[in-house]
């Protein structure tokens, strides 16, 4: 596999592990961080999919736009359209004052990320 694809996957997994660790925190959980790393994991996996297909991913954080490109390669991933649109907000806006995630957001972000990651990893023949 292309070394850049492997690097995107490794970075996606780093975000996934960070999301999972922070999700388990009992006191002073950083909900913003859980949501941010869920978004980042999905973004990096989408970019890995594009690279695997020989497409150069755009330098954007919009999961919907990235998914639109990937759907041409994986039409069955259309079921993630709503999830990716929702997760996109955590890539930028929640990192700055004015908006903060709560427990409901972080639980939903983690769940959506886990479901998407599972499907993507299957497409790469990973467990």
Image: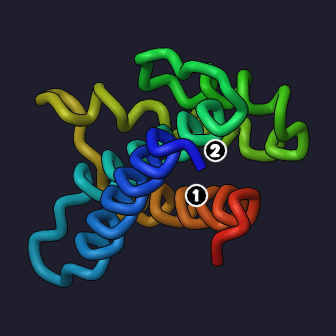
Tell me: 69 left or right of 34: right
> In this orientation, which residue lies closer to the viewer: 46 or 100?
46
87 left or right of 125 in image: left
Determine the secondary structure under disc 2. helix
Residue occupying the point 55% across, 41% down: 48
Q: Residues within 10 Å of mark 2 (few under 14, many from 20)?
A: some
Residue located beneath label 1 in the image? 112
Dot 1 falls on a residue whose secondary structure is helix
In the displayed structure, 30 sits above or below 89; it is: below
Q: Earlier in the sequence, mark 1 or mark 2?
A: 2
Q: Which mark is residue 83?
A: 2
**Is residue 71 in view?**
yes
Specify whether 48 is left or right of 35. Answer: right
Answer yes or no: do the residues labelled 1 and 2 have beta carbons within 8 Å? yes
Q: Quadrant of residue 74?
A: top right
Q: Quadrant of residue 68?
A: top right
Image point (35%, 51%), residue name: 11
Q: Residues within 10 Å of mark 1 (few under 14, many from 20)?
A: many
Residue for point 65% across, 71% down: 126
- Judge by depth and name the residue closer to the eye, 8 or 115: 8
Q: Quadrant of the C terminus?
A: bottom right
């Amino acid at each position: 596999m292309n070394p850049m694809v492997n690097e995107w996957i490794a970075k996606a997994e780093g975000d996934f592990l960070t999301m999972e660790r922070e999700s388990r925190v009992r006191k002073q959980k950083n909900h913003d961080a859980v949501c941010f790393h869920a978004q980042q994991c999905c973004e990096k996996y989408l970019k890995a999919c594009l690279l695997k297909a020989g497409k150069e991913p755009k330098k954007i954080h919009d999961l919907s736009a990235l998914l639109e490109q990937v759907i041409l390669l994986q039409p069955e991933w259309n079921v993630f359209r709503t999830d990716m649109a929702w997760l996109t907000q955590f890539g930028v806006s929640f990192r700055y004052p004015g908006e903060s995630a709560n427990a409901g957001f972080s639980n939903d972000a983690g769940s959506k990320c886990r479901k998407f990651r599972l499907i993507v990893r299957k497409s790469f023949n990973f467990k």
